Structure formats: structure tokens, C-alpha cells
Amino acid sequence: MSPLVSRPRNTVIHGDCVEVMRRMASASADFILTDPPYLVRYRSRDGRTVCNDDNDAWLEPAFAEMHRVLKPGSFAVTFYGWNVADKFIAAWRAAGFRIVGHIVFRKRYASSVRFLRYEHECAYLLAKGNVQMPEDAPSDVIEWVYTGNRLHPTQKSAAMLKPLIAAFCPAGGLVLDPFCGSGSTLVAARELERGYVGIELDRGHYHKASMRVSAPTRDSPSRAVFPSSIGVH
């Protein structure tokens, strides 16, 4: 396999997602589901932070590479920071994505209270080129499943990601998560019998994601290491 034109599958890769995706073949992913840093300098109650949540240098190059590696006629779902939505939307449009939907994850509790009680998180549904309607469209309001953030300070639940993978990734297709954190997207993809590729800069989270998908399966995951350069989470 050429290091410049690779088609990884069922693996977690440690490294800078921009550099890793540059080594991936164009149009090699069927669906992207990712939870990038929100650009809010997040710090959890126990003091944990998120890599590169204090800068946006990674934003445009990361989504440009996502658009390149995604197959034409396919979808991406990405979480984002609502108070810097303009930066995210500009990066998506610069990459070539179209905004085709918005998803609200409704919480049963307030994660913080300021001007409002913040009881939801949100993501956009993006499209590359001409896309077909899903056979069974999911709701644009999904109930939040609290994980306790045991493995990652902003850990998402695999259970609430599964309806999106089922709707927007074809059977046997490949799900890419360039900011995979503790691997929830990868776990959800594997449970739905989709292939998966996760990329994670933080070594500790990379190991956690690798462990979560390391149970014996028909296609055992492998580990690959690519060098970091600009340090994308």
C-alpha cells in the first residue's frame, strides 16, 4: 500500500488528522461523523481540556481534506461550537460542502447556566455533491444519552450516533471520524457492521479508542502511527 494513497479500514490512527487524511485516497469514505473542538477553550469541572480548542488553524484544512476523502454524493455530520458557528460554516462552504440539515441533541439537564439554561448540543448535516434522500430519515431531534464523560471530557454516546450512521452510511460502507476522541463513532459503526477509521491526536484518547474497538471481531482493528505536525485534535 502506497503511503500517499492509502485506504485504511477498521483502524484507529494516532496523529494529526490533516496529515493523515492527506495520505488517504480521494473518495475513500462513505460517511463522516465527527465531533471536532468547539473553539471555546473548554475546561471540564475536573479540569480536563480538549486539544486545539484554543485555535482555529486546523479548521479549514481539516474540512478541506474531509471533503476530498468523502465520496461524491455522500454525507457528513459534524458537531460544532454554536457561538462560533460563522467560522465553522465558512470552513464547510470553502471546502465545498452544502448544508442540508441541522440536528439537535436534547438533554434532560443543563450542562451550564448563563443567559440561558444550556440543555442541548447540535450538529449540521452536510452534503458533497448531489445526494439522495435516505430511505429512513432520522429525526432532527435526538435524545441525549449521558456518558458521564468517563473516557473523554466531551464524550458522546455511541447509542445516539447509531441512527445517523444507519441513515447516511450504506451497508458495508466506511465511516470516518477525523477527531475520534475516545472512539464512540467507531464503536457505533462497528455495531452496525460498517467499516471505520478514527484519527486522534491525543495519545491517551487514541489508546482508549483503540481499546474500545479491540474486542475480537471478524475484522480485528489495527493501529497505525502517523507523525503530527500542526497538532489537530
Image (tube, rainbow, N blue to C red):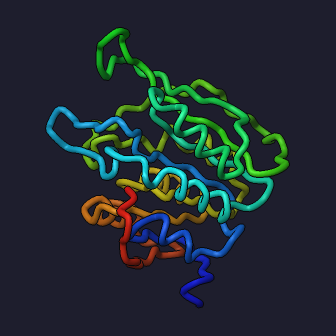
Q: Position of residue 111 (x, y in %)?
A: 31, 22
Rendered residue at 64%/27% (across/down)? 140
Depth check: give the residue in front, 82 or 153.
82
Q: Position of residue 230 (x, y in %)?
A: 38, 65
Total numbered circles: 0
Which residue is most to the left? 46
Rendered residue at 44%/47% (across/down)? 36
In the displayed structure, 50 sits above or below 30; it is above
Q: Position of residue 210 (x, y in %)?
A: 36, 66
In the image: residue 118, left or right of residue 218: left
In the image: residue 14, left or right of residue 162: left
In the image: residue 25, left or right of residue 58: right
Which residue is most to the top? 115
Rendered residue at 71%/58% (across/down)? 171
Quadrant showing the C terminus: bottom left
Depth check: give the residue in front, 70 or 89.
89
Rendered residue at 68%/42% (across/down)? 126
Q: Is residue 71 visible?
A: yes
In the image: residue 33, left or right of residue 28: left
Q: Is residue 193 visible?
A: no
Q: Report which quarter residue 192 is drawn in.
A: bottom right
Quadrant showing the N terminus: bottom right
Which residue is most to the bottom? 1
Q: Position of residue 87 (x, y in %)?
A: 52, 38
Q: Report which quarter residue 78 is drawn in.
A: top right
Depth check: give the residue in front, 54 or 153.
54
